[in-house]
Image (cartoon, rainbow, N blue to C red):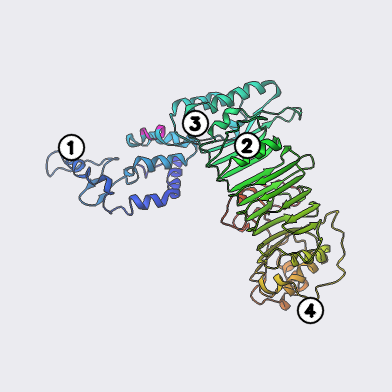
Amino acid sequence: MLWQCDRANRRLLLAMLQVNASLRHHCPNPRSPLPPAMEKAAPTAVARKRESDGIAGSRPRNRARGGNYDGNWVAEDPISRLPDAILGTIISLLPTKDGERTQALSRRWHHLWCSAPLHLQANSSLCSSLRWRPTIINRILSDHPGPARRFHFPFIQFTPGDIDSRRTELDGWCQSRALDGLQELNIYYGRWSREPPHISFLLPTSALRFAPTLLVLKIGSCNFPSEISPSLSFPLLKQLILRCVSISEDVFDQVLSGCRALESLQLWDILTARRLHIRSLTLRSIGSRARSACTQELVIEDAPCLERFVSLYPPDISFETIRVIGAPKLKILGLFSPCVSTLQIATLVVKGMSPVSLANSICTVKVLALYSSGSQLNAVLNILRCFPRLEKLYFTLKKHPKMDMKNVHLCDPLDPIECLAIHLKKLVFENYKGRHQDADFAKFFILTAKVLKEIKISSPKGNDIKWVDDQHKLLQVEDRASRDAGPEFRSEFSCLGKTKQIHDLLDDPFDCSCCRIKCNVLSGESCP
């Protein structure tokens, strides 16, 4: 029976939680009436069962696939009674290996894997295996007739000597009929450490044949084709990630113009193009990062639906110039540092950490994240004057060569900062070390922000009770402006601007309460 299952089959039950809504629709409880589509077939099924049970009065046989129908469900295996479409969806949510194993559960499940949507996701060992990878993938594609939903290869290894064969390999997979109708394509290429840096991989044009059906496209560590068809279009694409991709400005413009439903865009170390223009009527979220050898200027000219613009980790690697000219709905901004020489949001221009004019303000931004140090209080206060309606404020505290300003005066009580006096509800400090400079910086906000509901401070010593008590005294917590919020110390470190949160359009991308990592993300350690 299905309920007596091994570890792989328990994964099957967990996957069912992701289609819980469908389960409730088709089978609200074990004793609910049959779904309407199956009511006509029920009497026939009951009759067959009575015939097969033998002489009246004898004890009926138990069946793994069985179950009685007397106006209600009485089933030993209610999962197997679900329609093929739902069972196929469950199987498609499993890893490929476990999905194929479901054929051994019972005769009811035997045909489902081949008809379920293919979810082909390679693990790290398969991605790096030059010997077994072609055989395994070719077998899966030949055995499974489709349709396909996901083709996920996050790190495909190749060497200078076999670059042509690897390109042929990927081209053959992309041309397979089993992948027709693909909805998610994820291809990242990686090099062996001994490989010359100039060796790169050209993305085969056959990978673009899925454009009409793709919902998610992730491409990394390769060269985008220098010429593409003028008719190329991604009418359904919602998420686009380009990471360490060499692409020209013209091709980037052409790809973006063909994405008529795009909601989320991530640009990570784009090569070749020195300047990128973004024009999109549907785009809601952008995440970006650029090293010194990559694109230096990002211009967002026409994005009427853009709500969030996030600089990816680490925050000291970014474009030199960022211009957000046409984004009237922008609500979330950060994580920015002095490494951005020029930041323009509508009419507001910030050079380093200094606004050119305090007369221009952005009232739509509700969430702001800054990369700062305790010696930058004046600069930070000037920036806060430009965002009067802030409700959430995040600081990542770290000394930076460009952060050498002095705190020469505090806020004038006759000229209060609007967001601190009226709107700011949440305040977060990351990488707090407890030094006097950090304490003075944090103390100002604790003593000034009048309507705070949350104060969170992440520190390596967050679990040290005595140290926390000493910090309460340094921060003058008893004299805080808002009696509704007291500092909450924690030892975990959150990675502000994590890539996974760029595409989650429902949550605050800087709120890492559900994805904390126990490492100092600013000490140089890698971030998941």
- Residue 513 position by quadrant: bottom right
Question: Closer to the N terminus: mark 3 or mark 4?
Answer: 3
Rendered view: 73 above or below 144: below
| Residue linked to disc 4 | 414
Question: Closer to the N terminus: mark 1 or mark 4?
Answer: 1
- Contact, CB < 8 Å: mark 2 with mark 3? no
Towards the viewer: 264 or 527: 264
- Disc on res. 179: 3
Alpha carbons under labels 3 and 4: distance apart: 66 Å
Residue 141, x across and y down, in percent: 48, 27
Which class describes the residues within 10 Å of circle 1: few (<14), some (14-19), or many (20+)? Answer: few
Question: Closer to the N terminus: mark 2 or mark 3?
Answer: 3
Residue 435 visible in rendering: no
Alpha carbons under labels 3 and 1: distance apart: 43 Å
Q: Of circles 2 and 1, which is in front?
A: 2
Question: Closer to the N terminus: mark 2 or mark 1?
Answer: 1
Q: Which residues are magenta?
A: 110-114
Towards the viewer: 325 or 16: 325
Badge 2 amino acid: Ile
- Disc on res. 219: 2
Report the side of 378 relative to 324 (left or right).
right
| Residue linked to disc 1 | 52
